[in-house]
Amino acid sequence: MKHEQTAPSAAALPSKPRNLFPVWLAALLTLLWLIVHDLEISFETLAYGVADMGEYFSRYRKPDFSELSGYLDLMKVTLATALWGTVFALVVAVILAPLAARNLAPYPLAYRAARELLNFMRAMPDLLLALIFVAALGLGPLPGALALGVHTAGFLGKFFAESLERVDAGVYEGVTSTGANFLQIVMYAGWPSIQREALSYVLYIMDRNVRMASVLGLVGAGGIGMALHDALRMFNYGQSAALIIVLLITILIIDYASAWLRRRFR
Amino acid sequence: MAIISIKSATKRFPNGFEAIKGISADIAAGSFTVILGPSGAGKSTLLRLMNGLETPTGGTVHITGETLGKANLRKTRSHVGMVFQQFNLVERLSVVTNVLTGRLAHRSWLGSLFYLFRNEDMEIAQEALARVGLTDKAWSRADKLSGGQQQRVGIARALAQRPKVILADEPVASLDPVSSEEIMMLLREICDRDGITVVVNLHQVDLAKRFADRIIGMNSGRVVFDGTPAELSPLALQTIYKRDEIEDDTNLDLALAYA
């Protein structure tokens, strides 16, 4: 049926723009279902497994804190590894990020090079890097710190670059119009404008590095992870439980500390 | 003597829009010029050509006798202060640091890396802040100030450059009438007392008439009027505010009502 416009009271709105969200959602759900189907993931196995898992976890009931001071020393090594990794990442990211920000990069070639370098660092898994560095530098926290540093420099650099790209063009123009050079624009318009975001990113990377540093112990990069690895291999569930609790509490403390820092930095 | 000289400049943006369709103009040293015109007339683009924030597609721009090009871009900018509609301050830096950015062209990259300035720069910044009446706000963060105050910081930053020219792109478009008046008086006073050449983009006819030595009227990328405020007749205003697509324009009546 055809609608006749009889009264000239209100002009018809232009036709509504099409919203494709339901189509995308349906496509995503289909994809997920296909993946489950294709990998033959069975939810029945999961149900049977829960009972076994319960039995396994019950072995950790009695944490053994008899060597707590030793555990705390190991935790310190892990924390130091994470901290040095984060500092290394920060230094590399601060140098590369302004070059990897499209609106700041002085030359297109520098932009491409910085961007690809960050992509490369991010793409190298830190576990793999740690294996390589352990092979090259021997056991201990140094290869762990380097591995974390290289991998997270890629992340931090990308986060910083994207924040720098989001800064209002006018802020850069204000400083550019005084005759400032690239470095001065970065120092006076770039970093001050993103300092809060940047702090959040650094704290997140620190948190992540503490968790990862304990895993890196598994490949010989020292710290609490190495002790946990040994305890698990010897089926010493009491010690393992104690080590896991030390790790959990440390991560909780770091989480609260970074929340406090972020609040102070408004 | 012309301090800025634009020679048959054109500007076409990558999207094909031609903002400036061949403009030649000389700006006399020490004068107060207002560029008047409707939005989209190319006022901003013309002003940005004079600071190298845009490069002309055709023609040339000369500042103090030098042709603006890649090689002398930063040096030229250091003589040409710029004031923006949105102030364009670095909001998280203190007022005095924002003013000190006006000195960056004279500082080494190493000093800039550590946020170091010389005493002489500090004195210049102090003087500029006193000039705009914001000495007591020196250590406040820039985003804590009102719009009018932020624009005064913008002017202080331009003054700290010890410029020969100040370009102001719609400096009062985001401000209330009282602050607008203050800012325009400040710019006029800077022109009169320091002999700094001032070029201001405006869309308020009344402000243009009251403050300018010379008014350049623009419409769709061309200069359609060039004369003193006294010469700005209702007919001239009609040519400035004429729109191609709509013959009988209510905005035109509005603009004329202001005049």
Image (cartoon, helix red, strand yellow):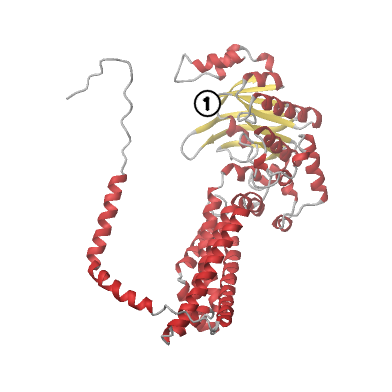
At which x and y percent is residue A242?
49, 78
At which x and y percent is residue A249?
52, 70
Position above or below: B195 against A161: above
Q: Nearer the viewer, residue A91 or B7?
A: A91
Specify the farthest residue to the bottom. Answer: A234
Residue B56, quarter of picture: top right
> Along the horizontal axis of the image, is A218 left or right of A54?
right
Chain letter of disc 1 in the image: B
Q: Nearer the viewer, residue B84 or A210?
A: A210
> Along the horizontal axis of the image, is A131 left or right of A49?
right
Position above or below: B180 against A129: above
Q: Residue at x 53, y 32 (%)?
A: B19
Q: Residue at x 30, y 49 (%)?
A: A24
Q: Residue at x 56, y 54 (%)?
A: A197
Residue B232, quarter of picture: top right
Q: Is residue A98 visible?
A: no
Location of mark 1 (residue): B220
Quadrant of the snapshot with the N terminus of chain B? top right
Quadrant of the snapshot with the C terminus of chain B? top right
Secondary element at tag 1 = loop
At which x and y percent is residue B46?
60, 32
Specify the farthest residue to the left. Answer: A1
At which x and y percent is residue B65?
72, 37
Q: Residue at x 44, y 80 (%)?
A: A62
- The amino acid type of the residue labelled 1 equals Ser
